[in-house]
Image: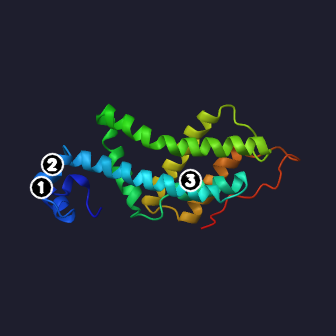
Amino acid sequence: MEVGIDRVRLAEIARRASMSSGQVMYYFTSKEHILLETLAWREHQDSAHRRAVLAKVTGAWRQLDRLTGLYLPSGPADPSWILWLEAFARAPHNKDVSRFLDDLMRPWREDLAEIIARGVQEGAFSPPADIEDFTHRYIAVLDGLSLQGLRQLFTRKRLMELATQAARLELAAPEGHDHGRQGLTRHG
């Protein structure tokens, strides 16, 4: 998205989709509807990719590292994050949009909760007081770090380091119970 959704003309959206403006409006009620459906489509693709990648990663710390790397923006023009920012800007003014975005975030939290539960079971992580609360906190940390990355205040490497610190504060297993814990680093 080269410009914000508010600055995109419907005629341009239709042209890029090889459709008429009337055809676009037949399927979508507004540009906001196009934005949200595009975001949902992208998140569906990203979730399938994330789950395929995570299935190939062994070890709770490595899985958490990989999920973190997939969550953080690839750079200031990350297309998924640009869509999310456009949608986030609408959420405070529309409860339906807010619920829609929460539904899109649910797979991220579920995948994170699975990693944490597995890591606790394996002894790699200390159990957080409440896994659901942890997933909300950690996603909030990643959201904040992502905004810093999109604003180019930190390198991607530094974002990963800061996420690692946040995870270790809550999840580091006590001494002697750390079964091969690996540091969180970006593994491509």
Tell me if 170 is positioned left or right of 143 in this view: right
Count of numbered circles on the image: 3
Which residue is outermost to the bottom?
Answer: 188
Tell me if 136 is positioned left or right of 60 in this view: left
Which residue is outermost to the right?
Answer: 176
Tell whether label 2 touches label 3 (CB within 8 Å). no
Measured in 3D between alpha carbons, the distance from the residue under mark 1 to the one under mark 3, in whole angstroms, is 36 Å
Which residue matches tag 3?
51
Tell whether label 2 touches label 1 (CB within 8 Å). yes
Crowding around mark 2 (Cα neighbors within 10 Å: few <14, some 14 to 19, many 20+) is some
Crowding around mark 1 (Cα neighbors within 10 Å: few <14, some 14 to 19, many 20+) is some
Hey, what amino acid is under mark 3?
Arg
Measured in 3D between alpha carbons, the distance from the residue under mark 3 to the one under mark 2, in whole angstroms, is 34 Å
Crowding around mark 3 (Cα neighbors within 10 Å: few <14, some 14 to 19, many 20+) is some
Measured in 3D between alpha carbons, the distance from the residue under mark 1 to the one under mark 2, in whole angstroms, is 6 Å
Which residue appears at 58% of the width and 45% of the height?
A: 111
Which residue matches tag 1?
21
Which residue matches tag 2?
25
